[in-house]
Image: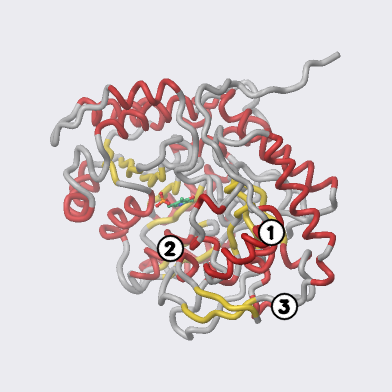
Amino acid sequence: MELPFAESFKIKMIEPIRRSTREEREQWIKEAKYNLFNLSSDKVFIDLLTDSGTGAMSDRQWSEMMLGDESYAGATSYFKMKNAIKNILGFEYFLPTHQGRAAENVLFSVLVKAGDMVPGNSHFDTTKGHIEFRKAKAIDCTIAEAFDTALDHPFKGNVDIEKLDSVIKNNTDKVTFIVVTVTCNSSGGQPVSMQNLRDIRNVADKYGKMVVFDAARFAENAYFIKMREEGYKDKTIKQIVAEMFSYADVMTMSAKKDAIVNMGGFIGMRTEKLFKQASVFNIMFEGYVTYGGMSGRDMNALAQGLDEGTEFETLETRIKQVEYLGARLEEFGIPFQRPVGGHAIFVDTKKVLTHVPKEQYIAQTLGVELYIEAGVRAVEIGTILADRDPETRENRYPALEFLRMAIPRRVYTNNHMDVVAVALKNVFDRREHITKGFNIVYEAPIMRHFTVELEKA
Ligand SMILES: *Cc1c(COP(=O)(O)O)cnc(C)c1O
C-alpha cells in the first residue's frame, strides 16, 4: 500500500484557541459593525483572514532571532539578508522595508507619476492603492480564462500578452513598467507560467520598459511551475526561482508571505542608479538603508525563511493542505476558483448567495455567515475591496465576488480544515434562505475594506 502524505514538520510549541457559541458570535459581529477586521482575534476560532505574517516560524528561524544584530548601520543581520536575496533571488541591490506595501511606496515614489499607466496581471489592492494614490492607472491585463472560476487552467495568473502589447503600444509615454504579481493574489493565488514571464520580458524589451515582480508568493509560483509546466519537473525550486527572477528588473516583496516571517519586506534592484533614487525615499519613509523598518533579528529570520520557503518539502506541505480543503469543498459541491490556488481557497460567492443583490455585498454577506456558523474568519475580495472609481466615485462591481479563505503557513492541521469545510457546507445548505446583505454606513476615501462599517440591509 502506498504511504499517505504527511507534513514535513513536527510541532514543538502550541498556542491555545477557543471555541465560542453562536449567540456570542452574533453579538460580537454586530458590535464589529459586520466588518471581520474589527473582531478581536480571541473571538475567532480558526483565522483565515490572511496568510500574511500569520505563519509559524521554524526552530531555525527562532534561533536566528537570538543572533540578530541590532546595530543601527551595517548590522551583520543586514548582510545575512543581503546574501540570501543575492543567492536565492539574484538581486545585487536591495532595501529593507517594514512590509510589502512600504516597498511599493518607496519604489513607486521613484517610478510613478500622475497620468501614468501601470499594466500587469490583476494588481493587489495595496499595489493598486499606491498607483491610484499617485493619480496613475492600474491596467488589468490578466488572461480572460482567469475570470471563469469553473475553468481549469494551470496558469490563471498569466498576462494576456496581446493586450499588454496593445496597452503599451497605445500609451508608450505613459508606461514606465509592468507589474507581474506572482502568484496573482487577486485572481485566486493563481500562478504565472515561466513561458508567460519570458513573453512579458520580450514585450518589455520591445518597448524599453521595466518589469517589476510583486513577489510575495514567488515560491508558491515556482512550485506550480515545477508541478505543471513542461520541462521543470526535475528542477529544484531554487533553480526555478532563479530563472523566474532573471526576467525581472525590480522586485517588491512582502516577506510576510513566502519568507514566512511575521513582519518584513524589501525591494530588490539591479542598478545602483535605482538603488540610490529609492534610498532617498527609504530613509524618509522607512529607516536607514541597512535596516529600513526592520530590526536585526527580523532580518535574520527573514534570511532563514527565504531559504526554507524555497525548499520543495515546505511548499508541498503547504499547498497540499490548501488542496485538501479544496477537495473537501468539492465533495460538498461548493463552487470556488479552480484550480486551487497556492495560499487560499476563493469561494465564488455569486454562485452561492444567488438571492443577495450585488449592491448588498454578496461576498461580505457570506463571510459574516461563515463567522456566525463556526467562528471561522475569512475575507471579502469583492465589491467592498474593489472600492469606488476614483473619478466617478461609483461602486466598482468586479467580475468576481470572492470570499477568500487564506491558510496561514504551518499553523493549522487538516482537522481545522475539516471544521472550515463543514461550516461552509452548513451555510451552503441554507443558502436559499439568505436573501439580504448589508449597507455601508461608514467608509474611508481609499482602501475602505479595512475600516468599513455596515448594517443589515
Ligand atoms: C500582501 C501583499 C502585498 C502587500 O504586502 P504587505 O506586507 O501586506 O504590506 C503586496 N502584494 C501582494 C501580492 C501581496 O499579497
Q: Residue 444 appears in which quarter of the rendering?
A: bottom left
Image position, residue 2 (x, y; %): 82, 16
Tag 3 or tag 2, which sits nearer the N-term?
2
Q: Residue at x 78, y 64 (%)?
A: 352
Indicate the secondary structure of the residue bearing disc 2.
strand
- What separation in Å lies between label 2 and label 3 (alpha carbons)? 37 Å
* Residue 278 appears in view: no
The amino acid sitting under disc 3 is Lys
| Mark 2 residue type | Val
Which is more toward the observer, 41 or 143? 41
Would residue 215 appear left or right of 114 to someone viewing this image?
Answer: right
Label 3 SS: loop
Would you call the spot at circle 1 few (<14 residues within 10 Å), some (14-19), or many (20 or more)? Answer: some
Query: Given this view, does label 2 or label 1 mark the residue nearer the observer?
Result: 1
Numbered label tally: 3
Q: Which residue is the site of mark 1?
A: 22
Task: Find residue 278 and report its horizontal and vertical position in percent.
Answer: 23, 51
In the rendered image, the quadrant that contains the N terminus is: top right
What residue would you read off at disc 2? 118
Q: Residues within 10 Å of mark 2 (few under 14, many from 20)?
A: many
Q: Are marks 3 and 1 in contact (CB under 8 Å)?
A: no
Which color scheme does this rendered protein use?
A: secondary structure
- Please identify, in this view, whether the residue under mark 2 or under mark 3 is nearer the observer: 3
> Percent from the top left, x then y, of residue 216?
46, 44
Kindly identify which numbered label has been placed on residue 436.
3
Q: Is residue 132 above or below residue 360?
A: above
How busy is the neighbourhood of tag 3: few (under 14 within 10 Å), some, or many (20 plus)?
some
Q: Residue at x 51, y 81 (%)?
A: 441
